[in-house]
């Protein structure tokens, strides 16, 4: 046993009662004809219900979800492509069957997550933020290339937020080194430290095209923020615009009962697993999970601080379990002995389960040896001023339009 580093292990699943809690199938980022999807509101909700989801958040661009029986308003211009398409809410009777009675599912309801919205609705560069539980941003077009105003407003009002598909904004899908860029890690990391109500970032979205290197960014952010006393949740959503997106990426959220308050607690503590049919670097560009096969899933986590081990029990649907630290695979198997890998561990480990049905990511297990170091900002004062000036220029909508049109012409 290597005793050069002994870790205090913070288990994100410590509060879970594995014998009585349930893994609730959840998607918290969904669209309809209310914004820019090609599916009617009631049809989208019905599709998730038919696919066995237990938690659903409608998070339209710039439109707060006021309940599934309320016809959402539409934003001018943004809704032009779908303006003449039907926009039907659920009837009160059907809504009750889904959210109260669990009709057709032996009483298992699907929770309507209150007041979901995708903020920065009108930006060209997709610096999108989801907010939940507070009435904020309704009809607001947002600020180009700046996540902070949206996150700050949700935080001020007592909501919870998440950073959506950041790879779309930093344009890292074709270059993993962009996701490793210290300026991107510093930007998102500082936001997360400033606003604890921003729970984390999407690491899986739809078919993983926009998020294909966002696990790399996630690992960098974990190393950045953990020494400051917080973590970053790695989240997964379908961001559905078509019915084919419904089961692409989602979460299993561990809760004692399917309620809004329990959901809030789970999102604060991180008692969830992110799963998906696609994960391009990890599973290969040509791989798609077989929906007829079970998704790999963790059924129990056991941390032994004295032995310095973390052990997983699973549903048996995985072909491989890998353990990640500092963005690299350091071990395989359902159990990791941290003492055998102290030279490779920074301040966390996380696991990923691969199988025929897709991939499952655990949240990060913080590994604190009492000597964690924060990441210094080595820029000079002049460099900081230059970077701030350029950042502020990029928040101007005219500049964003010019850049956007330039990229279209290049293509």
Image: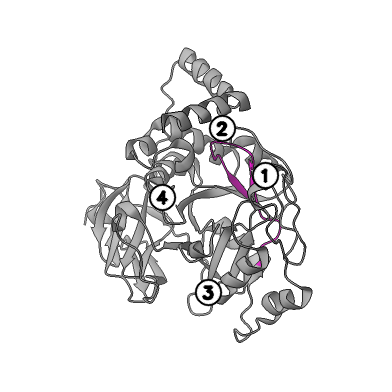
What residue is disc 1 on? Answer: 155
Is 397 placed above or below 43 here?
A: above
Residue 233 within the magenta-colored segment of the rendering = no
Q: Nearer the viewer, mark 4 or mark 2?
A: 4
Q: Which residue is mark 4?
A: 209
Q: Residue at x 39, y 69 (%)?
A: 302
Front-most of residues 134 and 13: 134
Q: Which residue is mark 3?
A: 51
Proximity of marks 4 and 2: CB atoms separated by less than 8 Å: no
User: Separation of disc 4 and disc 1 at Cα?
Assistant: 29 Å
Residue 14 visible in the shown view: no
Tell me the colour scheme of the image: one colour
Q: Which mark sits nearer the N-terminus, 4 or 2?
A: 2
Which marked residue is nearer to the observer: mark 1 or mark 2?
2
Where residue 241 appears, as percent x and y from the top left, is 55, 57
Tell me the mark number nearer the camera, choosing from 3 and 1: 3
**Overall secondary structure of the magenta stretch?**
loop
Q: Earlier in the sequence, mark 3 or mark 1?
A: 3
Q: Say which of 260 and 128 sits in front.
A: 128
Residue 291 in percent (x, y) is at: 40, 72
Picture coordinates of residue 382 (x, y %)? Answer: 48, 12
Instruction: Name the quadrant of the C terminus.
Output: top left
Residue 164 is situated, as x and y percent measured from the top left of the image, at 53, 47
The magenta stretch is 112-130
Q: Earlier in the sequence, mark 3 or mark 4?
A: 3
Q: Earlier in the sequence, mark 2 or mark 3?
A: 3
The quadrant the N terminus occupies is bottom left
The residue positioned 45% from the left and 44% from the top of the image is 226
Residue 11 quadrant: bottom left
Q: Which mark is drawn over residue 145?
A: 2
């Amino acid at each position: 046993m290597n005793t050069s580093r002994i870790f205090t292990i913070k288990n994100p699943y410590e509060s879970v009662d594995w014998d009585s809690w349930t893994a609730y199938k959840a998607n918290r980022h969904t669209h309809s004809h209310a914004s820019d999807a090609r599916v009617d509101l009631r049809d989208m909700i019905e599709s998730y219900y038919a696919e066995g989801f237990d938690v659903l958040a409608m998070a339209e661009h710039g439109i707060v979800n006021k309940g599934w029986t309320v016809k959402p308003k539409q934003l001018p211009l943004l809704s032009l492509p779908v303006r003449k398409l039907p926009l039907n809410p659920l009837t009160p009777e059907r809504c009750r069957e889904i959210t109260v009675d669990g009709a057709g599912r032996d009483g298992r309801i699907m929770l309507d997550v209150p007041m979901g919205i995708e903020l920065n609705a009108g930006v060209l560069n997709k610096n999108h933020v989801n907010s939940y539980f507070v009435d904020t941003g309704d009809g607001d077009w947002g600020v180009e290339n700046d996540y902070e105003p949206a996150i700050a407003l949700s935080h001020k009002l007592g909501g919870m937020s998440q950073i959506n598909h950041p790879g779309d904004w930093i344009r890292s899908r074709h270059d993993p080194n962009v996701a490793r860029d210290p300026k991107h890690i510093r930007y998102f990391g500082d936001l997360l430290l400033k606003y604890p109500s921003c729970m984390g970032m999407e690491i899986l979205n739809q078919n993983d095209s926009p998020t294909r290197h966002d696990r790399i960014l996630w690992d960098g952010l974990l190393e950045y923020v953990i020494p400051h006393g917080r973590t970053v949740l790695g989240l997964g959503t379908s961001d559905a615009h078509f019915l084919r997106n419904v089961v692409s990426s989602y979460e299993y959220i561990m809760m004692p009962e399917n309620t809004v308050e329990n959901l809030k607690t789970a999102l604060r503590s991180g008692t969830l697993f992110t799963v998906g049919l696609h994960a391009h670097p990890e599973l290969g560009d040509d791989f798609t999970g077989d929906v007829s096969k079970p998704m790999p899933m963790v059924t129990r986590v056991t941390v032994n601080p004295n032995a310095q081990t973390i052990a997983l029990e699973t549903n048996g649907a995985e072909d491989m379990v890998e353990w990640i630290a500092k963005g690299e695979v350091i071990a395989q198997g359902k159990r990791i002995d941290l003492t055998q890998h102290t030279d490779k561990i920074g301040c966390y480990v996380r696991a990923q389960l691969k199988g025929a049905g897709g991939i499952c990511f655990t949240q990060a297990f913080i590994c604190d040896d009492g000597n964690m170091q924060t990441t210094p900002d080595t820029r000079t004062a002049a460099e900081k001023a230059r970077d701030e000036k350029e950042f502020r220029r990029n928040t101007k909508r005219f500049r964003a339009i010019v850049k956007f049109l330039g990229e279209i012409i290049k293509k």
